[in-house]
Image (cartoon, rainbow, N blue to C red):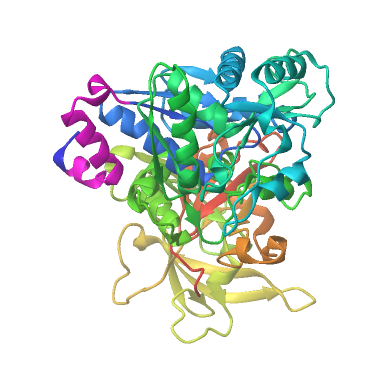
Amino acid sequence: MSTNENQSTSNFIRHIINNDLKQNKNNGRVATRFPPEPNGYLHIGHAKSICLNFGTAAEYQGTCNLRFDDTNPEKESIEYMESIERDVKWLGFEWHELRHASDYFEQLYQYAVDLIKQDKAYVDSLSPEEIRQYRGTLTEPGKESPDRSRSIEENLRLFEGMRNGDFADGQYVLRAKIDMASPNINMRDPAIYRIRRAHHHRTGDQWCIYPMYDYTHCISDALENITHSLCTLEFEDHRPLYDWVLDQLDVPCHPQQIEFARLQLEYSIVSKRKLNQLVMEKHVDGWDDPRMPTLAGLRRAGVTPNAIRDFCERIGITKKDSWIEMAVLENSIREDLNENSPRAMAVLKPLRIVIDNYPEDQVESLDISNHPQHPEMGSRNIQFSKTVLIEHDDFAEVPPSGFKRLINGGEVRLRGAYVIKCNEISKDEQGNIVELRCTYDPDTLGKNPEGRKVKGVIHWVSEQHSVPAELRLYDRLFNHPNPDTLTNFLDALNPHSLEVLKYCRVESSLATSAPGSRFQFERLGYFCRDLQDTDKGVMVFNRTVTLRDTWGK
């Protein structure tokens, strides 16, 4: 890694790790993990954690595991696990080992037995509501459960009965015995096991008790010999519990938990529960809808892994929560696509132009560069014929001030082709313009006309040789910068987040493009051939992002 790259990735976590390495802590080893719960698709917020965990491990020649926190079987599925694996790989990362919290269910159970034997855990019969009442408040201490004084022998018997299915769901929980007067509510005898008869997607019906996250996570880290457990700021208050559990048990190592600020992106939400609501209530077309902040949605929209990694690098890693403007993400996307996307021409709302002085049966094959700044990307052939199509908006019968496109009696250059002049307008019975009769200057291919200056350049396609396409103009899903702050986030849904144009025409070179191919449609924006809807007989292109930020306008 170069000096510049080291500087760009410098943050407080790197400083901590560098200091650990100087002291030869963990024998100079760095091991991280990315531990999502498989209860939904990954979103842009997870990308920050993925880039941090995998990137940190790579920077220090360490390892990073992908571990599924699969202790809540009612909300988890194989589909979500497969989508997470796919997304991590798509971002460009490979895990050292693929692990699951469920791999450790037996060990977790035995560690819980060990806590009971140390008189540091007990079986409690209080209801969830009673436990909340006994817990106290931020200003008042909690009070001890009547079951806190159970004997070790009785707790061992009841906990074994919980495992064996002798009791009803919710009849008992296993709680850590810590301190009901602790100023940190997380330390007031937290539950570490609950009874839940739910089929698990990996262990089936083998278990009817499942460990809680705070108990599972730290032990899983220790069993995998993780050195630095990187998590978001909401777990900062849970760190004393993380350390307490590991301090009581004979585990292979004691990882260091370090918290960083989660990604909060304007005009977006990153709550899995709310994203699931959008999908279930059909406000969007699935988890991979291009308007969704999921990695699957971003991929289908045409966003590249490189753009997401660049975005995560730009926003950095801090200890303070802050809101990131959507424009920061969109700028990363634009810069990447501008550099790497070949150009093409598409007409969204076609207006027919007949070139009267062009030979009736003549077809020219024009060689046009795929990228003006990158000649190594080659060129493609575009057919030019007597009848071409331009955008309706590129003609004005009564032009506004400063209009530099085609007007009646005026000239304009067709991109990569000739200068044409409009001589006649044809309208339908309703007064809509349906056709223009024009002439072309045959001496203007690749050069300016003699004695006159033509300012405007517009895109076009040959009517005869272009192919039909459906273009979907996606925009931000929400029209409020912080929809999560509203009483009902659905009130902020943008009614104009999708416009479907079914009668577009695109240049013939796109007919053989593969699903997922990305292009800059000249003067229109960046588009991607859709991954899902390319079997309808008409090509579908999704707009990834506009050419420039027009949201504020």
Number of numbered discs on residues: 0
* Residue 366 % position (x, y): 41, 47
| Dominant SS in magenta | helix
Query: Nearest the camera: 88 or 515?
Result: 88
Above or below, 445 relative to 144: below
Query: Nearest the camera: 219 or 482?
Result: 219
Q: Residue at x 67, y 33 (%)?
A: 148
Q: Residue at x 67, y 56 (%)?
A: 501
* Residue 429 % position (x, y): 80, 76
Locate the N terminus and report the quarter of the image it occupies.
Answer: top left
Query: Nearest the camera: 354 or 242?
Result: 242
The answer to if 37 sits in the magenta stretch is: no
- Is 168 left, or right, of 47 in this rendering? right
The stretch of residues the image draws in magenta is: 4-30
* Residue 342 % position (x, y): 41, 44
The answer to if 11 sits in the magenta stretch is: yes
Q: Specify whether residue 526 is in view.
A: yes
- Is 25 left, or right, of 85 in this rendering? left
Q: Residue at x 43, y 63 (%)?
A: 548
